[in-house]
Amino acid sequence: MSKCVICEQKRGKRFCPLKNAMICSQCCGLLQVEGNCPKDCPFLLESKTFASEKQGERENQLGERFKRDFSADDEEAMQTVDSVATPLNDLFLAAAKDDGYLEDKDLVEALDDLIMDLQGGLGEIKSPEDVKLNRAGNLVPQMKDRLESLDADPPVADYLVVPSLEILRGLVSLSMNEENPKAYIDELTKEREKEQEEQPKEEEEVAQAGKPVSVDVSQVESGPEAAAAAAPPEEPTASDLFEEAAEEPEEK
């Protein structure tokens, strides 16, 4: 069997229509990530089917986990998850801004480490010697700081923190794909930009709602004639009615 025409090391077991030659499975996977494969390539179709099935399994597992850990109705459960996820998502955005190489897999690894830490009953942040010297390890102490300073209303019960973290981890994991290793981070960035665009409009609407009605003084007439015109008409008195009746000519 001939060697792979790309790496020239492993045996070529798959015919590649793009290269018109035999390549190994690893190089085949790398070509799929680049997105240049013909759409009708059987190996590409097989890979997409497998990825879709795996994602479906992860979604089902996430749904079952959600139902098992939250006895409240969906709205209350999502509020709990949101109370935990929001400060961590803010942290992820800040970290991604400082480190352009931060990827979704780093977030998943950091959430895994944090969940293991909390499940182990460690009440204090790990010492620097215990923290792995990588992007995920550097996030863990900061994540714990955010959780310890949670100011949610209503407060999040301690026993729901880990399940909420696992739901967040599942959401990040579902977003992961080979084509975009920062899919979840990019989605957070888009949501934040949308919020920033809508915020001035909301502030303007609130300001307009509480703004008093303004009057252009230059258009307001002054003087006794203007005052007389603006004054409401006076009700006729009994003597006025008597004088009007006296002035009317008698009918013949």
Image: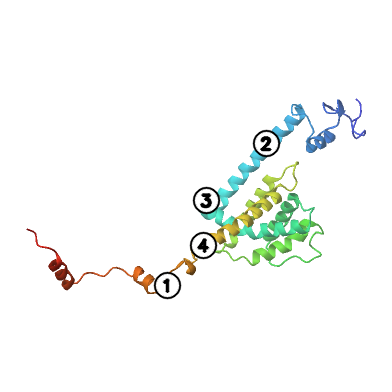
Look at mark 2 in the image and give the residue it sits on: 52
Is 180 or 207 nearer to us in this picture?
207
Per the image, the residue denoted by label 3 is 74
Q: Amino acid at mark 1?
A: Ser
- In this rendering, the label closer to the viewer, 3 or 4: 4
Question: Mark 2 or mark 1, which has the lower sequence index?
Answer: 2
The amino acid type found where label 3 is placed reads Asp
Which residue matches tag 4? 208
The secondary element bearing badge 3 is classed as: helix
- CA–CA distance between discs 3 and 2? 26 Å
Q: Residues within 10 Å of mark 4 (few under 14, many from 20)?
A: few
State the count of labels.
4
Labels 1 and 3 touching (C-beta < 8 A): no
Identify the residue at horizontal 75%, vertical 31% (top origin).
Answer: 44
Work out how far the residue at label 1 is from the one at label 4, CA to CA, in angstroms: 29 Å
Closer-to-camera residue (131/195)? 195
| Marks 2, 1: nearer the viewer | 1
Looking at the rendered image, the disc whose residue lies closer to the viewer, 4 or 2, is 4
Q: Position of residue 153 (x, y in %)?
A: 54, 64
Q: What amino acid does circle 2 point to?
A: Ser
Q: Position of residue 99 (x, y in %)?
A: 79, 57
